[in-house]
Image: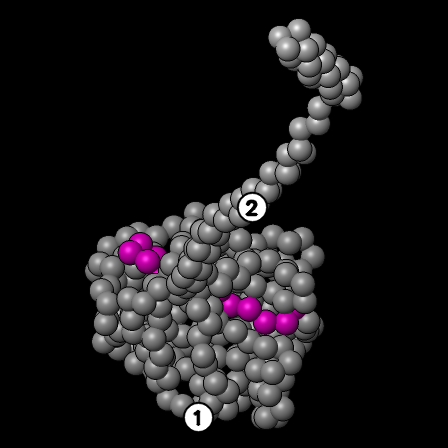
Amino acid sequence: MKKILAIILVCAFLAMPMAVSAEQIDLVNENPAYSINRAAVAPTIDGNIDEQAYTKLPAVQGDFSWNDNDTGILNWMMNDAGVEAWISYDDANFYVLLSASSGNYFMDIDDPGSIWQHSGIQISVAPGNAVGGDRLELGIARNSSTGEILVNLWADGPDGPLDWDIEASAHAVAIVGNRKNYEIAIPWTSFLPAAPSTGDTFGFNFIYHFVPDESTRTIAEFAAGCAYGKDAEQFGKLTLTGEPTWVAPPEPDPEPDAPEPAAPDAPAPEAPAPRPSPRTNDAGVVALIALMSIAAAGIVVLRRRTN
């Protein structure tokens, strides 16, 4: 009897996480489709949003399903919590950064395979033509007590030749202000035969888990195909544009060279001062008069003698 009771209790315990998510509210937009830009610079995987390396996925509320009958929950997740996905790519990797409010954050386990039951994220990717369970599915969480980061790979990519070691991958979880950010670089060859080209499409799904305590779990799932049955056909679709995530602003036109300052006008030459009339020295005048007088007197005397 005790064994039967123990088995029942174990089964009930295992069923609890599923019961928490039993009520799925269907998303409005099936297979939401968006474009994805090429990273102008490779992001530094540190949990910080680099707007030169990413573009924000312009997802709308109708692209999400959730697990609560209260429609206000999704409004809260999309507006107050502000669930965001920042994505980009280059020749080697698909980059994902998921961000939301750091409130309602509880994760106090150290088993990577069970992180889906607590605060954390799940990401699924697959070839564009994948069906059923053909997908790569991973999870990232951060222990709210110790800060330890946990990662787990639940499903290997169906077509990827790379035997990917997710624990050795570039990934991060950071609390930035009042937000909690999960970031990871996913190699293309972990789920595709080779890196895709401009214009190619692949499947994408993510789940953001909010767990405020040990008994409550609320999720927001982009598209469908993970939380309520593994079906890659229900994933959202992303198409590579080849356009960069950021373009440097044009350099401003150089300022024209300032003209050389004009030489100041030369001043007009001053008119020469009038020369004063020469003045004869008074003493010279007196002497001249005296000589003339003497000469005149001599002439008079000479005339008298002649006569």
Q: Position of residue 217 (x, y in %)?
A: 61, 77
Residue 37 visible in this rendered orientation of the protein: yes
Q: Position of residue 276 (x, y in %)?
A: 67, 34
Rate crowding at label 2 as few (under 14), some (14 to 19) or many (20 or more) other CA atoms within 10 Å.
few
* Residue at the image point whose x is 48% and y is 79% from the top: 221
Say which residue label 2 marks: 268
Say which residue label 1 marks: 28
Asked where in the image residue 59 lies, by quadrant, the reply is bottom left
Q: The C terminus lies in which quarter of the figure? A: top right
* Residue 94 located within the stretch drawn in magenta: yes
Q: Nearer the viewer, residue 74 or 293?
A: 293
The answer to whether residue 182 is left or right of residue 144 is: left
Q: Position of residue 127 (x, y in %)?
A: 26, 70
Residue 154 visible in this rendered orientation of the protein: no
Q: Nearer the viewer, residue 272 or 238?
A: 272
Q: Is residue 71 above or below residue 195?
A: below
Q: How many marks?
A: 2
* Residue 244 located within the stretch drawn in magenta: no
Under mark 1, the amino acid is Val
Q: The N terminus lies in which quarter of the figure? A: bottom right
* Residue at the image point whose x is 63% and y is 72% from the top: 101
Rate crowding at label 1 as few (under 14), some (14 to 19) or many (20 or more) other CA atoms within 10 Å.
some
* Chief SS of the magenta region: strand
Q: Is residue 58 above or below residue 196?
A: below
- Name the element at disc 2: loop
Q: CA distance from mark 2 to mark 1?
A: 90 Å
Q: Is residue 292 above or below residue 125?
A: above
Q: Which residues are magenta?
A: 88-102
* Residue at the image point whose x is 46% and y is 51% from the top: 259
* Residue at the image point whose x is 23% and y is 71% from the top: 200
Under mark 2, the amino acid is Ala
Q: Nearer the viewer, residue 101 or 159?
A: 101
